[in-house]
């Protein structure tokens, strides 16, 4: 059985948990707090980041995209990067956008100010950073609204890794109180289905 070393508020870990669930891959969760930089975890991933997936036979997979692509290629159930080459490129484009922009603009600042500072350094949050992240979050919700105005799911007619990725990031931002859902009916309805 696979062991997923993950931190519950890591959106990349959440993305992998969603992917494993869709693919029906049995796994157990191992909570890892990356800031502790445990030697045993660093032996698995020198970068010290979650998620890391380990199989009893010794296979170690690192990085959420590499893990998701591995299961897309090895498990036929529930294709998450479906369709033509153009369709798959659109899924990958959106996955990269959410993993890069949504994370950097919204999720990472919220995690830093509302979680890491409180737990690791015991510092108060910077309210200016929080306000800016919440403001930018609104533009990301606008973009998701736009996508859903033109498609059934974020990348096209069927559920894909783009939906899982966006949902993973939004769930962390939502948990940390960084989203104002008002005026975003399409995204709110889509998110309700994803939950």
Image: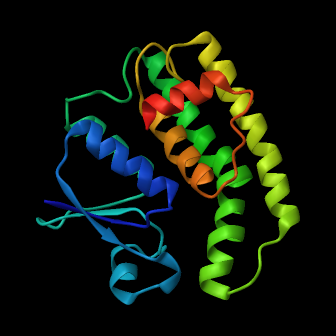
- In the shown orientation, is residue 43 left or right of residue 176? left
Please state the total of marks drawn on the protein image: 0
| Position of residue 58 measured from the top left corner of the image (x, y, whole percent) | 16, 67
| Position of residue 59 measured from the top left corner of the image (x, y, whole percent) | 21, 62
Q: Eyeballing the image, is 69 above or below 87?
A: below
What residue is shown at x 69% (from left), y 27% (from top)? 184
Please identify the quarter of the rendering in which residue 50 is found.
Answer: bottom left
| Position of residue 144 measured from the top left corner of the image (x, y, whole percent) | 65, 28
Here the colouring is rainbow
Q: Eyeballing the image, is 38 above or below 130?
A: below
Which residue is outermost to the right? 128
Q: Quadrant of the C terminus?
A: top left
In front: 21, or 192?
Answer: 192
Q: Quadrant of the N terminus?
A: bottom left
What residue is shown at x 16% (from left), y 51% (from top)? 26
Which residue is outermost to the front? 182
What residue is shown at x 54% (from left), y 24% (from top)? 154
- In the shown orientation, is residue 141 left or right of residue 76? right
What residue is shown at x 60% (from left), y 18% (from top)? 148
């Amino acid at each position: 059985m696979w062991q997923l070393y993950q931190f519950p508020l890591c959106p990349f870990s959440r993305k992998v948990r969603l992917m494993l669930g869709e693919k029906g891959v049995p796994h157990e969760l191992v909570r890892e707090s990356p800031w502790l930089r445990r030697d045993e975890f660093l032996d698995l991933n020198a970068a010290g980041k979650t998620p890391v997936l380990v199989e009893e036979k010794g296979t170690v997979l690192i990085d959420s995209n590499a893990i998701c692509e591995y299961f897309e290629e090895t498990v036929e159930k529930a294709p998450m990067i479906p369709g033509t080459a153009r369709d798959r490129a659109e899924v990958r484009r959106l996955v990269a956008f959410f993993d890069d922009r949504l994370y950097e603009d919204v999720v990472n600042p919220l995690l830093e100010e509302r979680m890491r500072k409180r737990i690791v350094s015991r510092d108060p949050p910077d309210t200016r950073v929080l306000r800016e992240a919440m403001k930018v979050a609104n533009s990301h919700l606008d973009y998701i609204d736009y996508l859903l105005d033109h498609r059934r799911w974020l990348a096209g007619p069927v559920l894909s890794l783009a939906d899982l990725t966006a949902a993973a990031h939004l769930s962390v931002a939502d948990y940390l109180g960084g989203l104002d859902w008002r005026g975003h009916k399409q995204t709110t309805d889509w998110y309700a289905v994803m939950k």
